[in-house]
Image (cartoon, grey):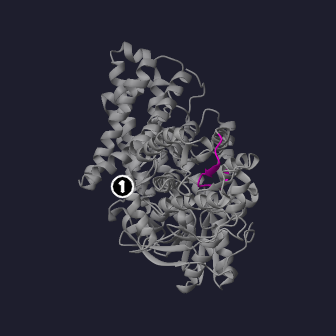
């Protein structure tokens, strides 16, 4: 078994999850100029919804479905309550609003559910590993990679084939012109949030399967990683978000795998320094448009 | 749990303050409690506080310490932030507390302990287990929980008895607990003839352990045992990914994973062995305490941290009774000399221990979703690594 290929698989699996989150962030950013820091809390919500459904004794696939529905509805509710009243406000105002939503959700999870992590055991099909000869892939890693690829293909199809997707891409280029063409802004933005919610929900399921438990702060770390991925990929570029997510996942895994033990404490610093270097030479990110402000 | 603990504490404080209104102020022991009731310490400080409440209620129902001095419990949440621990410690000292209980981690306990030290108020950490903590803060700081080097010695002893020859260690340098406990284990395990195949580091809250798991599976030969002091959410994540990669090497952990989350992991946690302060065998004092706990709180105790919380108050009560006053220096001197105080987890002795208690360590094994009692040990002094050994 080749350790390098093994770590490559590890990196792709982590990067795929980052990519799912990043593309959700990028969809919202491209339309509204908002970086939604409450995006990660949708993952947490997915987890709690699944725990609730499992506790009711319903089958696991139903729990996953309910988790995704909860994330989708919560994303749309978030838009209605916290972002619609601020439509057209400066990016900073909306950013603060999203941080407020995130904080309110954290506290609500702590007070109403528990400050303590809640275990969420996954069925046996998620555990175990397959030996492919060149690498040993954990079932959950294989599922992560396949689901991430499928989700990205579906999102691509939605964005390039369906009227909704075409409207989203048009709005990303010029929101006012799109409205003049007769697209309803409220409906479009609400659906875009719904789509980002589904993606956050899927990322949440994959994340929790690896983690075994759900706690109130679960979404904080991944949303920061997704933000880095979106910035690396080029703010607002959907393909860039995917590239940024994969790049970051691979970078993190390879640094943890191949830095000498003495320098391991600096792995995060090294990773972020490399990100800074990329941005020094390509301030607009991998796929960003060269003029940063429209 | 959160609601019960907080409302319980509030109700208790109110009831006690009104009771204290009748008695003269110096007839009450003001006991300050600082804990991370929210945030990463909540899994430990919430049960710890719930245990403190049981002891305070029991003592007050009997008329107070020595039958005459009721305890007034004043609770503050430091939100698992070290700076906040300092702020609320100052608040409590200004309110005139006589004894302070500090959070379940070293750094906030040092912050709060320094405030108490300066005011000559005896302080004790609920469950921070770094053996050097009382020495770092000063002569008014006590610890309560079985120390890291004690737990590590028991784990190394167990590993050796199981015939494990090689071990792999996962540690995080971010807190003394997650770094030093595994280091003590390495010292003790090697002293008993074991071999450490490798050590790797993780970040707290890391989530993805695939690189670390691949390092382990890529070793020339798998280790006989893997040891870590990681706790939730890192421990469930590491264990889940280790087992999902098909590695079924036994895993040893410490009291940080004494939490319902570990049992909630299902088959993945099967066979995990970890240390804590006590196991409730039928008919034991601990089982009796758990019954009393359930009567008081209306819900079963979630972990042995409830019992160690209860024990602190019993030790404080003994020290205050011996001192015969609520005077800080007098309580401190009496505390430093208490012997064989009967607690829920056994007897606790401070005399001759440099403010670190001598008490038993229990070994638990996850078996069929339940905890199984491997044994309770007081390791012989020769096998316990010194507080400064193994530091890198």
Residue in front for this viewpoint, B287 or B84: B287
Name the chain letter of the residue that bears numbered label 1. B
Taking the magenta stretch, the answer to whether it contains residue B93 is: no
**Residue beneath disc 1:** B299
Above or below A286: residue A254: below
Residue in front for this viewpoint, B370 or B247: B370
Measured from the top left, where is residue B217 in percent x and y?
A: 53, 72
Is residue B384 visible from the viewing direction of this image? Answer: yes
Occupied quadrant, residue B282: bottom left
The quarter of the picture where the C terminus of chain B appears is bottom right
Q: Residue furthest top?
A: A180
Is residue B210 visible from the viewing direction of this image? Answer: no
Measured from the top left, where is residue A267 in percent x and y?
A: 66, 54
Above or below B175: residue B187: below
Q: Is residue A162 left or right of residue B381?
A: left
Occupied quadrant, residue B26: top right
Picture residue at 52% right of the left edge, 39% below the top: B22
Taking the magenta stretch, the answer to whether it contains residue B104 is: yes
Which range of residues does the magenta coloring cover? B96-107
- Category of crowding for the residue at label 1, using alpha-carbon neighbours closer than 10 angstroms: few (below 14), some (14–19), many (at least 20): few
Measured from the top left, where is residue B17 in percent x and y?
A: 52, 40
Residue in front for this viewpoint, B28 or A95: B28
Label 1 secondary element:
loop
Measured from the top left, where is residue B244 in percent x and y?
A: 43, 66
């Amino acid at each position: 078994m080749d350790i390098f290929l093994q770590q490559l698989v590890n990196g792709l699996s982590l990067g795929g999850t980052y990519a799912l989150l990043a593309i959700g962030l990028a969809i919202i950013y491209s339309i509204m100029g908002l970086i939604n820091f409450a995006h990660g809390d949708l993952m947490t919500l997915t987890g709690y919804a699944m725990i609730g459904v499992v506790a009711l004794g319903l089958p696991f696939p139903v729990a996953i479905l309910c988790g995704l529905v909860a994330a989708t509805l919560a994303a749309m509710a978030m838009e209605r309550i916290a972002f619609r009243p601020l439509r057209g406000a400066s990016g900073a105002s909306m950013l603060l609003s999203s941080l407020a939503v995130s904080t309110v959700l954290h506290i609500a999870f702590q007070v109403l559910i528990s400050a303590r992590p809640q275990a969420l055991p996954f069925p046996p099909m998620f555990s175990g590993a397959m030996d492919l000869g060149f690498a040993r892939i954990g079932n959950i890693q294989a599922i992560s990679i396949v689901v991430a690829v499928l989700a990205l293909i579906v999102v691509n199809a939605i964005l390039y084939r369906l009227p909704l997707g075409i409207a989203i891409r048009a709005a990303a280029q010029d929101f006012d012109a799109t409205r003049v063409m007769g697209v309803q802004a409220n409906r479009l933005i609400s659906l875009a949030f719904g789509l980002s919610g589904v993606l956050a929900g899927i990322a949440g399921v994959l994340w929790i399967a690896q983690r075994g438990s759900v706690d109130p702060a679960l979404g904080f770390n991944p949303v920061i990683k997704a933000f880095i991925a979106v910035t690396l990929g080029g703010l607002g570029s959907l393909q860039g978000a995917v590239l940024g997510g994969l790049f970051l996942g691979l970078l993190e895994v390879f640094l943890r795998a191949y830095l000498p033990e003495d320098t391991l404490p600096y792995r995060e610093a090294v990773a972020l320094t490399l990100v800074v270097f990329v941005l020094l030479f390509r301030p607009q990110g991998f796929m960003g448009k060269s003029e940063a402000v429209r | 749990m959160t609601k019960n603990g907080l409302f319980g504490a509030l109700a208790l404080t109110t009831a006690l303050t009104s009771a204290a209104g009748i008695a003269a102020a110096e007839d009450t022991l003001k006991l300050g409690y600082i804990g991370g009731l929210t945030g990463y310490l909540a899994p430990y400080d919430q049960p710890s506080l719930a245990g403190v409440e049981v002891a305070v209620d029991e003592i007050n129902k009997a008329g107070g310490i020595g039958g005459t001095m009721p305890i007034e419990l004043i609770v503050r949440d430091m939100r698992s932030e070290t700076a906040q621990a300092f702020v609320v410690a100052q608040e409590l000292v200004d309110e005139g507390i006589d004894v302070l209980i500090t959070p379940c981690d070293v750094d906030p306990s040092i912050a709060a302990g320094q405030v108490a030290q300066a005011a000559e108020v005896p302080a004790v950490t609920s469950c921070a287990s770094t053996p050097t903590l009382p020495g770092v803060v000063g002569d008014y700081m006590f610890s309560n929980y079985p120390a890291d080097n004690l737990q590590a010695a028991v784990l190394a002893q167990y590993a050796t008895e199981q015939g494990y020859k090689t071990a792999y260690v996962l540690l995080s340098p971010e807190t003394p607990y997650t770094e030093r406990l595994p280091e003590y284990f390495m010292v003790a395990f090697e002293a008993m003839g074991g071999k450490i195949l490798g050590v790797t580091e993780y970040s707290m809250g890391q989530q993805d352990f695939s690189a670390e798991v691949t390092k382990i599976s890529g070793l020339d030969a798998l280790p006989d045992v893997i040891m870590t002091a990681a706790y939730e959410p890192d421990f469930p994540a590491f264990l889940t990914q280790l087992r999902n990669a098909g590695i079924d090497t036994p895993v040893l952990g410490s009291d940080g994973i004494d939490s319902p989350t570990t049992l909630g992991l299902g088959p993945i946690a099967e066979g995990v062995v970890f240390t804590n302060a006590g196991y409730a065998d039928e008919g034991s004092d601990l089982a009796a305490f758990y019954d009393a706990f359930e009567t008081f709180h209306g819900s079963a105790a979630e972990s042995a941290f409830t019992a160690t919380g209860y024990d602190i108050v019993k030790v404080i009560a003994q020290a205050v009774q011996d001192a015969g006053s609520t005077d800080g220096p007098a309580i401190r001197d009496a505390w430093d000399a208490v012997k064989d105080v009967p607690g829920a987890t056994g007897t606790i002795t401070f005399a001759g221990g440099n403010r670190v208690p001598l008490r038993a360590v229990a070994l638990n094994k996850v078996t069929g979703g339940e905890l199984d009692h491997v044994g309770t040990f007081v390791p012989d002094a020769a096998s316990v690594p010194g507080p400064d050994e193994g530091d890198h």
